[in-house]
Structure formats: C-alpha cells, structure tokens
Image (cartoon, rainbow, N blue to C red):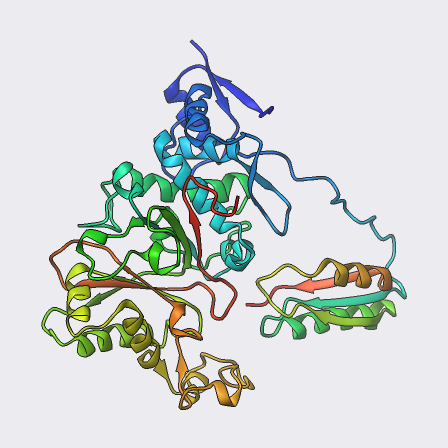
Amino acid sequence: MSLELFDPTGEPTPTGFCSAPRLTSVEGLRIGLFSNGKVNADKLLRYTAEVFEQQANCNIVIDSGKRNASRIAEPQVLERIANDVDFLITAVGD
Amino acid sequence: MTTKTHTLTDELSAIDWCYEQGWTDGLPVVPPARERVERFLMAAGRPPEEIVARHPATGRECSVQSAAINAVMAGCQPQYFPTVLAALEGLNEDAYNFHGSTASTGGSAPVVIISGDIRDEIGMNASVNVFGPGNRANATIGRAMRLVIMNIFQMIPGISDRSTTGWPGKYGCCIAENILNSPWEPLHVSLDFPPEVSTATVFAASGFYNVENHYTSDPKLLLDTFADAMASLGALTDGQSLVVMSPEHAEIAASGGMTKQDVQAYLFEHASRDPEEMLSKGKWPAGHPGDGLAEGERGNGAFRRGRTPDDILLVVAGGEAGGHSAFLPSWSRGRNSIYQTKAIGVCLDC
C-alpha cells in the first residue's frame, strides 16, 4: 500500500529576488543606514558604520529608515537607496 | 494545478514523516492525502489555484488548494473549510498586517470569531469552555490558521516568528458567538453584514486575561472591572481590544438598558491611565511625545485603550453560568493591526 501526500508548503517564492553580488573590498565605499525605527536601532547602525569609516575609509551617505517597524519598507525607497550606496547596513532593535 | 507530492508507505509513518519535515505545530497532523484534500476542494467550490492570501514581504502565496492541504493536516472536516478560507481572507487584508503580527516579538495569534448560523451548521462551540479544548471545529479551524502561517508563509518559530514568549492561542484560537444567550444583536449585524450571512472575524491578539467578577449586579461596577483589566499597565496601549463577555456578565451589563455600543463607549472612557504614568513606568521611551494624539484629541489628558469605542470588539460567548469573561489585547501597540471581518462562503462584493 502507498500513500500519496500533498506538500503543504505551497509554491516556491516568486522569482525576482536575487542576492547582490559579493563585494571584494569595502575600502572607500558608500554606506547606507536603514533603521526599522525600533529604539536604539539607529545607535547600533551608526556604531557599526563608524567601524567601516575608521577602518576602511567608508562614508555614510544615507541615514534613513522605516516609519513603521512592523510594515515592509516601501519598494521605491529601497530602490532609491540601492542606487546611491555600495552597501546597506540594517538592524532590528526591539 | 500541479502541487508537489510525496509517497509514503502508510498513515503512521506519514505522521512521523510530517514531523521530520518540520510541518507541524508540535502536535501530530493528519497526513494530507490526495483524496482528503479533494473533498475539501469540493466543499469550497472555488478554483484550487485561486489565491486567498499573499505575504507582503516574501510574496509567498496561499492558494485554495494549499489552504486545503493545511486544513486537512489540522484535522478539519470539509464543511469547516469555507470558514478557514474566510478567516485567511481576513488575515490577508492590509490593515490586519499579518507579516508584522506573525513575525513580531509580541507573539500575536489570529483569534477567529465566528458569527452567524454556520456556528450550528458545522457544530461549533459557543458555550461552556468556548476557548478551551473539546470541540473539533473550534480546535481545528484555529489550528489550520497556524499551519498555513507556518507551512505556506514560512513564519517558523525561532526563525521568522520571533515571539518572545508566545501564548497558547498560537496553536489555534477560534470561538463562536453565543447569540442564543446574548442580550444584543449578533456581531456580524453590529458590523453591518446582512443578518442571513455568517462571518469570520480575525483579531491579532497577544494574550488572554480572565476578567472575573461574581458579586456585583451593577452594570457600571461590572464594567469598571473590565476597564481595570484593559488598562492594566502591562496591557495598556492604544491598540484594539477584544472583549468576550460571558452571558452572565452580558446580562448584567444590559440590565440597565445599555446597548452594545453603550458598553463599548463606557469601556473606552474608563480603560485609561495618565500619560505621565506611561512615561514614568517605562511604557514609553524617554522623549516620547506623549500619547501621540493631538492636544484636542486627548480626552481629559487620559491615555485610552484604542482611539474610538469601535476599537473595542465586543462579543458574547461562553457558558451560561460563571462570572468569568475575557479580555484579549491587540498585538499592536497602536494602529498596526485592525481586526477584519469576512463573509463565509459568499461574495458580498461580487
């Protein structure tokens, strides 16, 4: 006897998502900070970014975030940021 | 519609296999065999590929068939499935915010409240032990919601579901309104649905508080007990509230001629604290501007549960005896989740 079961996990995640290419060096790159708005998230982001500023001559060019921590970031905001930075640091504080 | 399938040798090994795949909530599931799922699809009468919910962050989609698979696993019977679909449609509304509510450390559970004749048609419990175990429909409709959230939307405890403590309602929480012992109109009528329709309301709750008062027959003193619970320092936010009033408490509240709207208004007025206390006790961070409302909107300087009396969802349910009711606060500490109500088995906008 055999039993055929349906998979309960549904269809795969829709395409359109892909990883950004790996950076080979962070020297002198432009940093974006994107906070989710939780308390102290901004401090953690800036502290982390300062390490890159001090050790790799990076510059913080964007310091932004979501207005609502429990909602996804607006796609147009992320797209604008992606065009202006070389890498983004984001964090979740709670 | 093609869906991935797996071949197992027998039911018992299939139960263990589902555990191994991480497809359960910790309890055994009913193996989603083809013939079981097909009976659910017949009960729904909707195209299997129809999408009923979509995750706003990942884009993952829940089809009617995917929902049926998980409803089978939850132990539902086919006749419950239209109710499951209506609840999922409520979850899908932007105002419910199901990503935030299912990922948050706040540990919310989608509490499903059924109003209307379908309660009896599918054998739900609206009476004794309404939140507790023992009724298949109540238990499995609620459970189906959780399995969909975990399996289809991949909101997995410890990974994408970061609830600090969670609460037992996350296994499943579904009740029916006890309209037979209610002094007021049915919930779905209060929410402007046609009387002949049945509805599923989903409310993102972060916990359960038993409100007990056995000795007063004064409506206002009774409601003060509720207001005090709703304004407890650990629960007070301006998020919404679900108040499930037992028949005994509802009878007392209505004895002085109070309508459901009067009760909501009284609770809204009295479930409050001084904003200064919210700051001094660390409920708000240092530098918080206050209750977030404009000066003219604040009522006598009080910080209230919700923004209007309609933010208090009032339902009568539970056994006829016992001075016990329930207050469930919204997961949202503000306006990030608003309860949603959908008609079951009918399209009112078509």
| Whether residue B302 is situated above or below residue B340 in the rendered picture | below
Q: Can you name the residue that lies furthest to the top here?
A: A1
| Whether residue B155 is situated above or below residue A71 in the rendered picture | above
Q: Is residue A1 left or right of residue A58?
A: left
Residue located 27% across and 77% down the image: B228
Tell me where residue B215 sits by quadrant.
Answer: bottom left
Task: Please name whichever residue, B197 or B253, is drawn nearer the observer in this view of the structure.
Answer: B197
Task: Please name whichever residue, B302 or B236, is drawn nearer the observer in this view of the structure.
Answer: B302
Give percent across and percent down for residue B86: 44, 44
Give percent across and percent down for residue A36: 64, 66
Residue located 46% across and 62% down the image: B106
Which of the image's four quarters has the N terminus of chain A?
A: top left
| Whether residue B296 is situated above or below residue B128 in the rendered picture | below
Q: Is residue B175 left or right of residue A12?
A: left
Tell me where residue B304 sits by quadrant.
Answer: bottom left
| Whether residue A28 is situated above or below residue A1 in the rendered picture | below
Residue located 41% across and 43% down the image: B344
The answer to whether residue B76 of the structure is visible from this angle is no
Tell me where residue B301 sits by quadrant.
Answer: bottom left
